[in-house]
Amino acid sequence: MATPNDSRLCRLPTEILIEIVKLLPNFSSLWALMSAFPRFEFLFLQLPFEIFDTFLEKETPPCIQALMRVALVTRISPSWFPDIKDVTKHMSRHKTFDLYFEALPQHIEEPHLTSKVAFAVRDMVEVAHKIHAVAHACLEYYVRKSMTIKPERWDASLPPFDHSQLGGQPQGLPIQPTPTGPPTYEEEQILIRLLWRLQVFTDLRAAAKQDYLRHWSVDECGKVQTWNVDWLFHYFTPKSNREELFRTYIDSWNPYCEKEQFRSLMDFIVDITAAKTEYQPGLRELEAFMKDLPVDVYESGYHVTCLPPKPILEIRRGPITIDDLLPATLSIDEMVEKPPAGWRVYHQMTTDHRYYYSGVPFEPYRKYGFAFWQAERMGNLGFKEYDGWEDDGSILRVCYFVWQSILRGVDVVSAYSYRHVVTQ
């Protein structure tokens, strides 16, 4: 049997190998090829930034590209960032790295530095593969969980009861969830974005621990070394999006939604690893998990690919109308950075003051993956977004009934330290 070095593939001219590499669909396939054939790894180390950027711009939304570049620069030159505010500006694309990458060749002329930087970029390819694998495995897990949900819908024959009170709701008609299919590209990118956010936190923490951020204030160094992810989401959120007085549930970079997405991720990790901890799993446990992924999760990343939606021209026959063009006004960044439909509906239901629902936490809904699901999947599960601008309350009562039905049999007081009890 021929070894990887004896392969006819590796005997091809370098120019052809470069073109082969550029035809690969994603970072996972690139990592697989580099792991299998040393010559491809050598080729990558000769052109790390050129190849990395090619894959970065293939199918990666700009909002995630920015996070990946922040993680890379943190590993190569953490001193580039003067403070947390500057990191956040780069993460949110308010600043770019154009000047950094233009100046980089002048700072790594020595061979040992060139090699160090090349291997840092190579390691980023493996991280990208791991993040892709974890995101898909986590979403597949919640797709299965979502099909165990048992919502109930309103029926006109039900006896009267007080809609404004939580508890005492009679049993409605069962809703049979429609099979929702595999995770979509948008849902996968939502979780991938979260994982890269967390990767930046991890890399900054490592840089601070090695004293590479000594030019930062003592307070800011302390902030990046905290294990409290809830605080980190707030520290690294653009200030304009942190103003609570003006915040809405549809704002991009919503740290409250990100916290629930993180808890959903950690619930998945605890479940598949059978981990037992008396504390709420956090960044430390995630870091350990990412360093040593279960084999089935690690290898699944090689076999699954969520492709972005095709442009209208590729899927639509006949004349294009104005209605056909409207979806194009929503960028992929907007879809990925804003809270998904599952969170938006929860927020709507818990902030309408006509109903006594505000104290219910997200946890009963989190276990079904609502922190990631877009509108179509939510609709298939029996839940729809509520537009109450012209509603007299009748539509809201129907939506409210479905959402409260999920709490049937859940003791909210003992489980979540709230005063509501729903044990009907």
Image: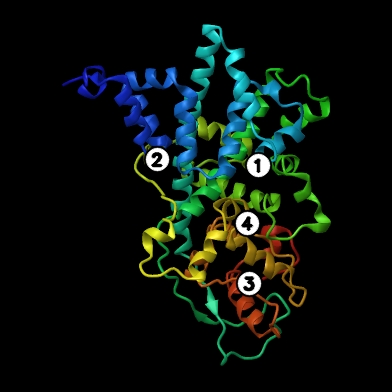
- Looking at the image, residue 65 sits to the left or right of residue 38; the answer is right
Residue type highlighted by circle 3: Thr
**Label 3 or label 4, whichever comes before in sequence order:** 4
Residue at image coords 50%, 25%: 49
> Looking at this view, is 116 or 43 the one in front?
43
Whether 61 is drawn above or below 38: the answer is below
**Real-space Cα distance between discs 3 and 1?**
27 Å
Q: Which residue is mark 1?
A: 279
Quadrant placement of the N terminus? top left
Provide residue 232's location: percent of width, then percent of height.
71, 39
**Real-space Cα distance between discs 2 and 1?**
30 Å
Disc 3 crowd, CA 10 A, few/some/many (<14, 14-19, 20+): few
**Real-space Cα distance between discs 2 and 3?**
41 Å
**Label 3 or label 1, whichever comes before in sequence order:** 1
Q: Which residue is mark 2?
A: 301
Task: Name the disc covering residue 339, or none.
Answer: 4
User: Picture quarter containing residue 334?
Assistant: bottom right
Task: Name the disc covering residue 423, or none.
Answer: 3
In the structure shown, which secondary structural element does the residue marked by tag 3 occupy? loop
Residue lying farthest to the front in this orientation = 319
